[in-house]
Amino acid sequence: MSDTIIIDDLLTPRLNDMQKAALAFGDANPIALTEQAILDAARHQTGLHDFGADDFRERLNILLDEWNGDPAMTQIWRLTLLGYATRYAANRLLIHDTLQRHPEIHDEQIDRPIIIAGLPRSGTTHLVNLIAADTRLQALPLWESYEPVPLPGEGLLPDGTDPRYQRCADAWERSQQISPVIAAMHPMNPDHIHEELELMGPDFASYNFEWIGRVPGWRDHYYATDQTPHYEYMKTVLKLLQWRNGKKRWVLKCPQHLEQLGVLKSVFPDAVVAITHRDPVAVIQSAVTMQAYSARMQRTEVDAPWLIAYWTDRVEHLLRACVADRAVWPADQSIDVPFHEFMADDVAMVGKIFARAQLPMTDRAHAEIAAHMAAHQRGKEGRMVYNLERDFGVKPDVLRERFRFYFDAFPVKAEVH
């Protein structure tokens, strides 16, 4: 792949053969997105029937109303969302079954986790993967976040691979074939450290659903609802994973935490939080470009004005909440991570976070982080070239004025002009 990637068909896609075939397959196989279809599929997949508390059904139906009320959604994306929802429902069954059989899981303690919060596209992924390279810590790889509990009776494959890992690897391979530049935008290989909001999925919660569908009604429900129960659910799944994998200190990351700092403090009171800060115009530019590229498979048209309006508003909400609630986390339990400082010397920034977390930076940790960096060189899949004004009709410096409150609060440097 070329070092530089310019998407010159962002708003008027030229589909490749794989994309055309996928869209045609969806059109030939329309499906019903209903609660019964999803829950029946989950029961069939797992052989289990007890979902635990029923409150998730209301949230599932809010999502279904949004998805079914979107006439521009492609049939292949409806099929994809059916797969997402079924996986979440199946995971809910498996998690509840495990907790019923092993109530001692609730006694596990999640001690002093290191939690990264910050805007999407602000370096959180690179930061968590660097820290997770330290084997004194445990993190959440993508494959395990997608299926935290094995299917009943399912053993390892003949070569010793966990079938959950293989399913994730196969899905990543298909994704790369259908959307060739996605690896440069947002790598999703099985070992990639993922966001713990994936563990809220079985509770049908989190802002993640905003990234995979046009769901303003879901956003409004999320805004209006205390997220504490869903953070508690996520913490319980972390306990389950710790019970199975062994106790190590966790490193976690999720952009949603930026607007839930108070909830995060109540659920993880002894955590150390690292908050990344980046020019929101650069964040929006990256996010809407990724969303517009994804739209060629998800929607019958690429609606650039809607994307820029929605995600500008969404980023503003995240940042206003961060500015308002930053003081919830005391100085000895938190650190701000300016993007320009992190990019200038990422290992030094990890050292500062370790110091705040009272975790010594040992020679072994240095070596493990260096080995990770050597194996995962930034930009090896190519570097995206963005153009907010060309693709979305927005002047970066004009857009930045909307975020003056954020620049006044934190040492953020403007990147895009």
Image (spheres, helix red, strand yellow):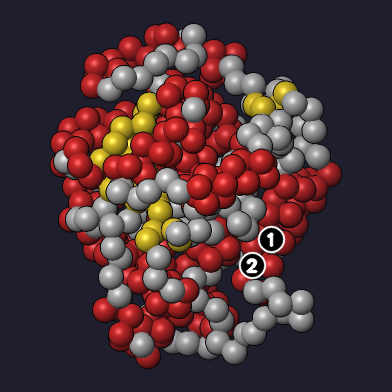
At x 45%, y 48%, the residue is: 362
Tell me how far mark 2 sits from mark 1, CA to CA. Answer: 6 Å
Crowdedness near tag 2: few (<14), some (14–19) or many (≥20) residues, C-alpha within 10 Å: many
Crowdedness near tag 1: few (<14), some (14–19) or many (≥20) residues, C-alpha within 10 Å: some
Residue 142 at x, y percent in the picture? 55, 58
The residue lying toward the viewer, choosing from 416 and 30, is 416
Tell me: 370 left or right of 25: left
At x 62%, y 58%, the residue is: 190
Compared to 100, does 292 lie above or below?
Answer: above
Q: Which residue is mark 1?
A: 169
Q: Is residue 35 visible?
A: no
Residue 281 at x, y percent in the picture? 44, 20
Q: Which residue is mark 2?
A: 165
The residue lying toward the viewer, choosing from 393 and 358, is 358
Q: Mark 1 is on which residue type?
A: Ala
The local secondary structure at tag 1 comes to helix
User: Which residue is farthest right?
Assistant: 17
CB within 8 Å, label 2 to label 1:
yes
